[in-house]
Amino acid sequence: MLGAYISPLYSGSDLAWGIEGTVAVGDLDGRVVMNHLYLLGLEYKLNSDNSFFVEGGFKTWSEVTGTAAEFNTRNINHLGMREIFWNLNAENTKLTVGLQTMTAGDYFLLDERVVGANYRQNYGQFEFSSQLGSVKRDFARMGDFCGTRKIFYMAKGTRAGDDLGETNLF
C-alpha cells in the first residue's frame, strides 16, 4: 500500500519516497498488547519504463501482564523487508520480478506477498497474465514481519513455509 503513496524527493527527481506507521494497542483480559510497524519505501526510476522499488522497516510487539505492583513484560522486535523488486512498465508489457505483493483478479483467489515474477502482456482487447512465486513465513502477509496475529494470540493458521518452495499440497 505504501508504494501507491510515494512522492518524488524533489521536483524532477528520479527518487521517490514515503513512510508509513501503524500502531495498535489493546487490553485483553488483563493483558496490554502493543504492535508498532514503521516502514520506509523508496522507488528509483531508471528510465521511463524501468524502476526499482524497496520497502522495509521495523516492527515491535509488546505484552504487559500482571498488576501495577508486579508485572511482566515481553517484547519481540523484527527488522524486515516487505517488498523489493524491479518493474518494467512498457506500453503493452508489464513485468515485475522480486519480493512483491501479488494478486490475481480476485483478492480471494490470490492476495499474497511472494518472491517471484508477474508478467502481463496486452494484445488489444485481450491480456495474457502469468504469475510464478513462492511464499515464506518471514515475509508472508500474515507472517512474522507483517502479520498482527500475535496481538490477539491467534493461531498461526496460515501454512507459509520456513523455506522457499515448500508446499502444503501433498
Image: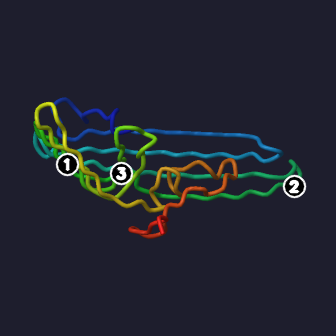
For marks 3 and 1, give the CA distance: 15 Å
Residue 29: percent from the left, percent from the top?
A: 82, 45
Residue 70, labelled with which disc? 2
Q: Is residue 62 above or below residue 11?
A: below
Residue 151: percent from the left, percent from the top?
A: 66, 48
- Under mark 3, the amino acid is Glu
Is the Cβ of the residue at disc 2 closer than 8 Å to that at disc 3?
no
- Under mark 2, the amino acid is Glu
Residue 124, labelled with which disc? none
> Which of the marked residues, 2 or 3, is nearer the chain's N terminus?
2
- Under mark 1, the amino acid is Leu
For marks 2 and 1, give the CA distance: 56 Å
Q: Quadrant of the N terminus?
A: top left
Q: Which of 147 and 160 lies nearest the eye of the viewer?
A: 160
Residue 163: percent from the left, percent from the top?
A: 44, 70
For marks 2 and 3, give the CA distance: 41 Å
Q: Please tell me which residue is depicted at 66% across the width and 45% down the height of the picture.
A: 34
Residue 69: percent from the left, percent from the top?
A: 89, 51
